[in-house]
Amino acid sequence: MKKDVLNAEVLKELTGVDIYCYNCIDSTNNQAKRLINEGKQKTFLVVADSQTAGRGRQGKSFYSPAKTGVYMSYVFHPMADFSNSVSVTTAASVAVCKAIEKLTDKHPEIKWVNDVYLNGKKICGILCEAVTDFETQKVSSVIVGIGVNIKTSDFPDYVENASNLGADVKRADMIAQITRELSEIVSCGYDEFIDYYRNHSMIIGKEIDYTENGRVTHAKAIEIEACGGLTVQLESGEIKTLRSGEISVRRR
């Protein structure tokens, strides 16, 4: 059996993009920002065996022990369709799910906006960040940070409801497939993948809680709208579309 190692030359051959590969780093997103600041302008990928300060959405940390997961940041320069955070995070979750389905027999689901779940537990977190050009004030680069628990276990207490993919797949193969899926999505446009996202949603029709400006509100998830927003019905009957925030499925 081949060793599960990450090699920049092999990954570049598999993905066709420039690769920056590290044994250990604070955060692949942080390193992506540093490389952009150094003038890197092509599409590129940052990967690491482990992270000491992996980050997730809402200021959360992402547990990143050595050689048990995929820790990667894909950097591209967006078309207009990918200038907002919901569309980018939606695209990223679709890319991860497609990669998992092509490489394994697993059937992942998506918890809005972009967490990937398997059998009711989170196996992937995604953090997308935009870099704005100072002069034009337009988004010049988008960093798509992705962490997938391939065989990570023994999670610390602060990590809730997490699990792993539980499949015999090499990290390099998963990184390459996710990168290929992302490259295809950002070149084809938003309309090409929104139906896939809807079909893999784990929350439509369910009672949820969403947090907005520090306030928790009860609602029912109705549908994913055309641009990735989540349409919900409040207890008052009011219909509202969420563009950002954190949700949880309400336990009965």
Image (spheres, helix red, strand yellow):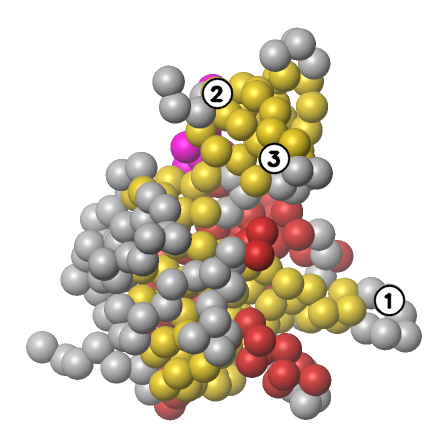
Residue 91, given in percent of the width and then of the height, sits at 54, 52
Q: Provide the residue span drawn in magenta.
A: 198-205
Mark 2, other Cα within 10 Å: few <14 / some 14–19 / many ≥20: some
Q: Quadrant of the N terminus?
A: bottom left
Q: Magenta region, mostly helix, strand or loop?
A: loop
Mark 1, other Cα within 10 Å: few <14 / some 14–19 / many ≥20: few
Q: Residue at x 48, y 86 (%)?
A: 20
What amino acid type is highlighted by mark number 3?
Thr
What amino acid type is highlighted by mark number 2?
Glu
Say whether marks 3 and 1 touch (CB < 8 Å): no
Residue 58, given in percent of the width and then of the height, sits at 58, 51
What amino acid type is highlighted by mark number 1?
Gln
Residue for badge 2: 207
Q: Quadrant of the C terminus?
A: top left
Residue for badge 1: 137
Numbered mark located on residue 211 in the image: 3
* Residue sitting farthest toward the right: 135
The answer to if 75 sits in the magenta stretch is no
Compare residues 244 and 90 and report the one nearer the observer.
244
Q: Residue at x 64, y 47 (%)?
A: 86
Q: Is residue 114 visible?
A: yes
Residue 122, given in percent of the width and then of the height, sits at 36, 47
